[in-house]
Image (cartoon, rainbow, N blue to C red):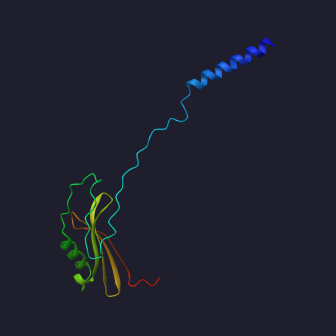
Amino acid sequence: MKKTLIAILVCTALCAALAGCAPAANTQQPTQQPQTTQPDVTAKPDETTQPDTTTQSNATQQPAITEDEAKQIMLGRVSGATAADIVSLRLEWDDGRLIYDGELIFDGTEYDFEIDAQTGDILDMDTEPYPDRD
């Protein structure tokens, strides 16, 4: 009986010692949520919105291409279209760079543009029938 009691005491002491060495289960490090900016969706279709630069790493970056130059780039790709056919054009951040995001509707086709605001390069141009009947 003494051997059993001693074995139980030794096991209890070992368990207590091991439990004291283990890290506490409730020690969580606080995590910071990354800040994100949402584009301004309250603008009228013919207005250009300025990007929110408060959380951008290159917040001092200004577009080299003006809104009028971006419109001319769009019109240069759609033969026969005029400035009146431009439905929207806004300046926004996309993948860490400033772009002009524009939409033009002409002759039964909707054209969507993404233009690099620094170089004037067309990054993306999509077309689809307008009105979309799908």
Task: Look at 50% across and 35% down and name the residue there.
Answer: 27
Q: Residue furthest front?
A: 42
Task: Look at 54% across and 31% down and name the residue there.
Answer: 24
Left or right of residue 41, residue 3 in this image:
right
Q: Position of residue 19 (x, y in %)?
A: 60, 26
Q: Residue furthest top?
A: 2
- Classify residue 13 by image quadrant: top right
* Frontmost residue, 29 versus 82: 29
Instruction: Tell me: residue 83, above or below residue 27.
Output: below
| Quadrant location of the N terminus in the rendered image | top right
- Classify residue 129 by image quadrant: bottom left
* Frontmost residue, 80 versus 17: 17
* Frontmost residue, 83 versus 115: 83
Instruction: Tell me: residue 55, above or below residue 130.
Output: above
Q: How many badges with numbers are in the image?
A: 0
Q: Position of residue 12 (x, y in %)?
A: 68, 21
- Classify residue 16 by image quadrant: top right
Q: Residue furthest bottom?
A: 107
Q: Position of residue 80 (x, y in %)?
A: 24, 86
Instruction: Tell me: residue 73, above or below residue 26.
Output: below
Task: Look at 33% across and 59% down and name the residue there.
Answer: 95
Left or right of residue 50, residue 127 in this image:
right
Q: Position of residue 83 (x, y in %)?
A: 22, 81
